[in-house]
Image (cartoon, rainbow, N blue to C red):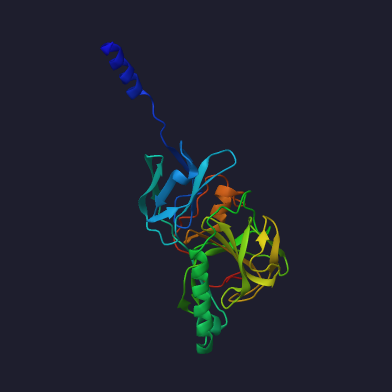
Amino acid sequence: MRAALIVSLGLLTAAPQARLAVTHTARAIQPGEVVLMTIDAPAAPRDVAVRAFERDWPVYRDAEGAWHALVGIDLDAKPGTYDVKIAAAGDHATEPLTVARRVFPTRQLTVNPDLVNPPPEMMARVESEAQHLHEIWDHPAPQRLWASAFVRPVPDEANSAFGTRSIYNGQPRSPHTGADFLSPAGRPVKAPNAGRIVLAAALYFTGNTVIIDHGLGLFSLLAHLSEIDVTTGDMVAAGDIVGKVGATGRVTGPHLHWAVRLNNARVDPLSLLYVLGAAPRGGGPGEAPSLSDTLLVREPRTPHD
């Protein structure tokens, strides 16, 4: 009887336990890239936690029951190995991400001097708008509002590299935090995915601007529009028209500027398309951004913001 009990307890102890299985998908592991974490774990979604780069990342479940987290490698992330820590139902796993060095090009642009150094009478507006944007990034919808694949807002090629260091009228300024599309004035601009319009207004630097809250810390900013066709509070679906391409704000010609914020990380919209939509044109699976030496562009051939 005692021997049978020992055997029985041994079998119970040896029973296999479900473990976390974690994989990741990305165009590259570099500053400005989006990493899609996929988590296989025996827990309810509310019990799954993901932490990386000293911040927590929202987790969601897709239609097939798989759990995911979008992790953004900020534009200013330093090269090195970072741990993505996952916890679910008392189980833990670590997925290392080795962030490679990325060299960004530099461009020199000539624009209206007031758009480089706003006149004193405009400073209150500039500061108010900056504060308003911070409030938007810090208060995303807690639920996922997107459902389908992300789509390009315009059919044109992106002609300006994310992260480019800009020199306006000889003065260094903040890096370029979006992708520019050389689209003709008046071309309809589509919502990259479903979400709520949280800003539809003219801003000093970005001109006529629309911001879409896709939920879970993910935002799209569409700038320099000639027209805005939505209002704050509207719900949009992927592909809905939100405005038209223009040349408002700090620009040298008509184009669309698309920027993405992910949990306050500044990431390349084309990397978001890679993991949750179509890969950028001209780039096959696994293509990484260029690691070539810094390029100094003295006379831009195409309009930029």
Residue 154 higher or lower than 50, as above or below: below
Q: Is residue 4 left or right of residue 161?
A: left
Q: Say how many tags the image has.
A: 0
Q: Is residue 260 visible?
A: yes
Residue 71: % across, % down: 47, 52
Q: Is residue 302 visible?
A: no
In terms of image quadrants, where is residue 54?
A: bottom left
Query: Which residue occupies the foreground of this view, 158 or 93?
Result: 93
* Image quarter in which the C terminus is found: bottom right
In terms of image quadrants, where is residue 22?
A: top left
In the rendered image, the residue lying farthest to the bottom is: 121
Residue drawn at (56%, 52%) of the image: 144
Residue drawn at (46%, 57%) of the image: 292
In the rendered image, the residue lying farthest to the front is: 1
Residue 154 higher or lower than 301, as above or below: above
Residue 221: % across, % down: 58, 65
Residue 135 higher or lower than 22, as above or below: below
Residue 145: % across, % down: 60, 54
Residue drawn at (41%, 39%) of the image: 89
* Image quarter in which the N terminus is found: top left
